[in-house]
Image (cartoon, rainbow, N blue to C red):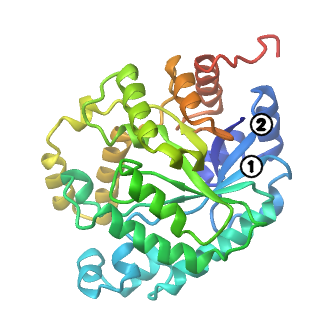
Amino acid sequence: MKRLFHLSTTSKQLDLFDKDWEQIKGFIEKNRMDGIEVGLTLDYPLEQIPSGIVEGVHLSFYPMWLDFWRQDQVKLQQLFDDEESIKSYYGGLEPAVLIESYKKQYWRAKALGAKYMVFHVSHVLPEDSFTWKFGYTDQEVMEATLELVNAVFEAEEDGPMLLFENLWWPGLTYLNPELTQWFIEGVQYKNKGYLVDVSHLTLTNATIGNEKQAYEYIKKVITQLGETKKWIKAVHLNKALPKFYMGRNHYYLLEQYQKAKDKKQQLMILKKHINALDGHVPFDHPLAASILELMDPMYCVYETAPSSRYELAYFIKCQNEALKMMTNKND
């Protein structure tokens, strides 16, 4: 199993290393990691990224994409102020722009020599994230995702693995074994599999308040997958204990969101809400090792949200210790 950490090519994340890839290489070596999973922005120059350190590429995610894909003009008018806003969000006015975007990202992942790509299977509207009342079923989101994915990724076998990641919103959740098997069988691209995000899976159960409960729940869900478990190739390791936040009534936040004076303020409220749910903190409990043993992945990605490189090093240390993979203290 290779151990990676997630790093985006956004300025905010690269600033942790003074935008210096040599510092990133040194950090990887010092912390005894095997490389990175990169969140690759569409316009970042590939030549700046040193060869050999990128194992995975996280493809972009449009949380509210299904109405655009279906060209539901009524719903699009409710979501966006005008056509320019639609263009700004998706890159154009026709569904073909999504296909073109992912094809470009696929090419860039191959150019980097990535071993895998990550694709979110989900759809959610901002207000639904507060109410938990959704307009689409898991199957509807998964059916549309198959349409998009099969239009982007041809059935070739020499490209990076295409790994599908779960969220706690409609789409891939791993809670329905039959639907999970049906989906992976429907993907035409041969080099495919699943990625389990530990926090996202935990967030499908609002009663979880400690690590033992999280482990028992994850064990139950993964065991119920049966033979489908063999498709799990990677894990995003982090921790969420949703009981204390998800147990609240979030309608007061919905009111704040709806009364916000502009889109920027709305986005701040939404981000604060999502971060409270999915904080990307390290899974610093010994049961982290048991969770990985359940799935036996090829890749374990430490997906956390540090505010500095020193905090990132600390988060890595916490999860290494939880996995009994401590680095040499003399290094």
Can you say whether 175 is above or below 280 in the image? below
Q: Quadrant of residue 169?
A: bottom left
Report x, y in % for residue 21. 79, 46
User: Label 1: few (<14), some or many (≥20) within 10 Å?
Assistant: many
- In the displayed image of the protein, which residue is found farthest to the top? 330
Q: Nearer the viewer, residue 8 or 170?
A: 170
Q: How many marks?
A: 2
Q: Quadrant of the N terminus?
A: top right
Report x, y in % for residue 303. 56, 39
Report x, y in % for residue 66. 37, 74
Left or right relative to 169: residue 57: right
Q: Nearer the viewer, residue 144 or 125?
A: 144
What amino acid does circle 2 point to?
Asp
Residue on which disc 2 sits:
34
Can you say whether 241 is above or below 61 in the image? above
Q: Nearer the viewer, residue 318 or 217?
A: 217
Res 301 seen here: yes
What amino acid does circle 1 point to?
Glu
Report x, y in % for residue 4. 69, 38
Q: Residue at x 76, y 40 (%)?
A: 24
Q: Secondary structure at mark 2?
A: loop
Res 45 seen here: no
Mark 2–mark 1 contact, CB under 8 Å? yes
Which circle's residue, 2 or 1, is located before the other in the chain?
Answer: 2
Can you say whether 69 is above or below 250 in the image? below
Q: Quadrant of residue 298?
A: top right
Disc sitting over residue 175 in the figure = none
Disc sitting over residue 55 in the figure = 1
User: Label 2: few (<14), some or many (≥20) within 10 Å?
Assistant: some
